Image: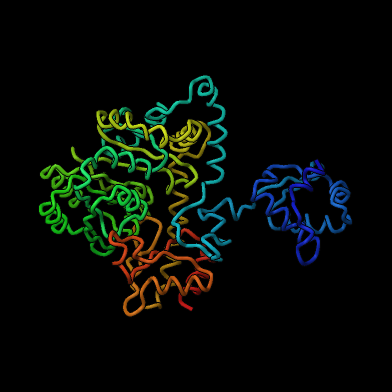
């Protein structure tokens, strides 16, 4: 054990500074990298000193640092156990946002992502492992999804006002996988244009561009939402067969479609034989108190896609399509479907997290309540930091980011380049534009980081 522990620390002695500090840092990094799993029981101080060829005093100092910082838990007579500190496990912010990410950036705010709900996820993982025995005696070949997960997703739709049967659900490896399968099935005429919002989610733009689809952008703003007259005019003039919309806490503007607008869009789709793919990835990230009750954007020509990635964790690659049972069967025949289906254990974990907590977990409602409260505080903190900048924005009712308008003459690309020089990575508006050039004075700024990191980021952005 001692030798294995020492090997897991790597070449830590080459670091500058006191040995005790270097040793404590090496242990933290080994835990984060997975070389020393959380829950590992450490050898005694005497054994560690012998294995690491250090004085016992140096080892004691290093362990004290780790204990004070929350990386060790010591119980008298039972030794010390490695753990992740509460400040990392009891928050929505990925730890990597504190440590840089994109390129050489010290701070990376290009991704609007959250950390997993730590305790709930570990509990779900344990329960999923216990339920996996039956899966292991089967083939593991991709299907429309595990029956229990499809039932849970159908029940969630039904309980929120959209009656759904399990056979109307197809489980995928995320919302992008869902959109890829639908576009492959529905966009059969490459000459037919596709309606998208401006701005919109860059991942969706990338999927549509790969098919060389002609994009018809329709404006959406945080303050005024969707212009249904402009949308109707675009559909009448161009005859598109497919549209991609994000009605719930729109990415990146945060706009939320009103119930009358949803009804108008569904009616427009029905009149013009327009299939509307509705991305509901952000729907559960409602930061209003209490959350609203807007209906799903639904209708005979409307298909919903969703994902666990924004609400729970990006590492849980489980998404879904909610459509007619006939369309689900058609998509299942696509050879891509097997490649875009999540592994069975991932689906089991998702089912445990989306369940009601009867298996011993906290349940999705408890997880969502905690996430919403934390994101609400971070959103309001970021809005307060930006109050004196002169930039304009609408504080969104949900989602994960603010959509800033910088005004003249600074472009977002120029500002992003300056910020990158100071160690901050951010996403300028043209990334969210169908033409890659407009939205030049807009910037997306997620509030998924901790208040301390957001404070540092705004200082770098405005300095």
**Percent coordinates x, y for residue 260 in the rendering:** 17, 51
Viewer-side residue, 364 vs 98: 98
Total numbered circles: 0
* Residue drawn at x 54%, y 59% as measured from the top left: 101
Viewer-side residue, 254 vs 277: 277
The image quarter in which residue 95 lies: bottom right
Viewer-side residue, 423 vs 186: 186
* Residue drawn at x 36%, y 50% as measured from the top left: 282
**Percent coordinates x, y for residue 158 in the rendering:** 29, 34
**Percent coordinates x, y for residue 349 in the rendering:** 49, 35
Compared with 173, 196 (above or below) is below
On the picture, is 21 further left or further right than 223? right
On the picture, is 448 further left or further right than 76? left
**Percent coordinates x, y for residue 87 in the rendering:** 60, 55
On the picture, is 311 further left or further right than 359? left
User: Which colour style is shown?
Assistant: rainbow
Q: Work out whether residue 288 can be spotted.
A: no
Image quarter where the N terminus lies is top right
Q: Work out whether residue 186 can be spotted.
A: yes
The image quarter in which residue 147 lies: top left
Compared with 128, 96 (above or below) is below
* Residue drawn at x 53%, y 41% as measured from the top left: 121
């Amino acid at each position: 054990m001692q030798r294995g522990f020492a090997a897991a620390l790597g070449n830590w002695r080459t670091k500058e500074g006191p040995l005790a500090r270097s040793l404590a840092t090496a242990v933290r990094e080994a835990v984060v990298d997975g070389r020393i799993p959380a829950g590992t029981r450490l050898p005694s101080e005497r054994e560690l000193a012998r294995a690491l060829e250090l004085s016992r005093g140096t080892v004691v100092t290093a362990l004290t640092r780790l204990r004070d910082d929350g990386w060790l838990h010591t119980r008298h007579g039972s030794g010390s156990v490695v753990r992740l500190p509460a400040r990392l496990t009891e928050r929505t912010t990925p730890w990597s946002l504190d440590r840089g990410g994109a390129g050489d950036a010290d701070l990376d705010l290009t991704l609007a992502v959250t950390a997993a709900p730590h305790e709930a996820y570990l509990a779900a993982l344990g329960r999923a492992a216990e339920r996996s025995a039956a899966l292991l005696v089967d083939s593991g070949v991709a299907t429309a999804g595990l029956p229990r997960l499809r039932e849970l997703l159908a029940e969630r739709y039904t309980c929120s006002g959209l009656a759904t049967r399990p056979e109307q659900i197809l489980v995928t490896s995320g919302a992008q996988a869902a959109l890829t399968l639908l576009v492959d099935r529905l966009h059969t005429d490459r000459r037919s244009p596709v309606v998208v919002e401006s701005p919109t989610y860059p991942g969706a733009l990338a999927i549509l561009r790969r098919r060389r689809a002609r994009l018809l952008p329709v404006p959406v703003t945080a303050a005024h939402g969707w212009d249904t007259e402009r949308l109707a005019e675009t559909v009448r003039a161009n005859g598109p067969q497919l549209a991609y919309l994000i009605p719930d806490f729109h990415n990146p503007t945060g706009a939320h479609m009103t119930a009358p607008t949803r009804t108008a869009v569904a009616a427009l789709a029905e009149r013009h034989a327009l299939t509307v793919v509705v991305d509901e990835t952000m729907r559960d990230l409602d930061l209003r108190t209490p959350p609203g009750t807007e209906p799903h954007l639904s209708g005979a020509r409307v298909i919903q896609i969703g994902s666990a990635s924004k609400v729970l964790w990006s590492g849980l690659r489980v998404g879904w399509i909610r459509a007619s049972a006939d369309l689900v069967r058609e998509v299942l025949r696509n050879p891509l479907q097997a490649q875009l289906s999540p592994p069975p254990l991932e689906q089991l974990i998702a089912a445990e997290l989306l369940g009601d907590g009867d298996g011993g977990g906290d349940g999705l409602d408890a997880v969502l309540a905690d996430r919403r409260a934390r994101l609400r505080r971070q959103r309001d903190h970021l809005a307060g930091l930006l109050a004196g900048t002169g930039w304009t924005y609408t504080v969104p009712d949900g989602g994960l980011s603010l959509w800033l308008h910088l005004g003249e003459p600074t472009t977002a690309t120029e500002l992003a380049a300056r910020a990158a020089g100071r160690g901050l990575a951010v996403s300028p508006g043209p990334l969210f534009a169908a033409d890659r050039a407009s939205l030049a004075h807009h910037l997306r700024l997620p509030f998924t980081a901790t208040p301390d990191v957001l404070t540092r980021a705004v200082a770098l952005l405005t300095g």
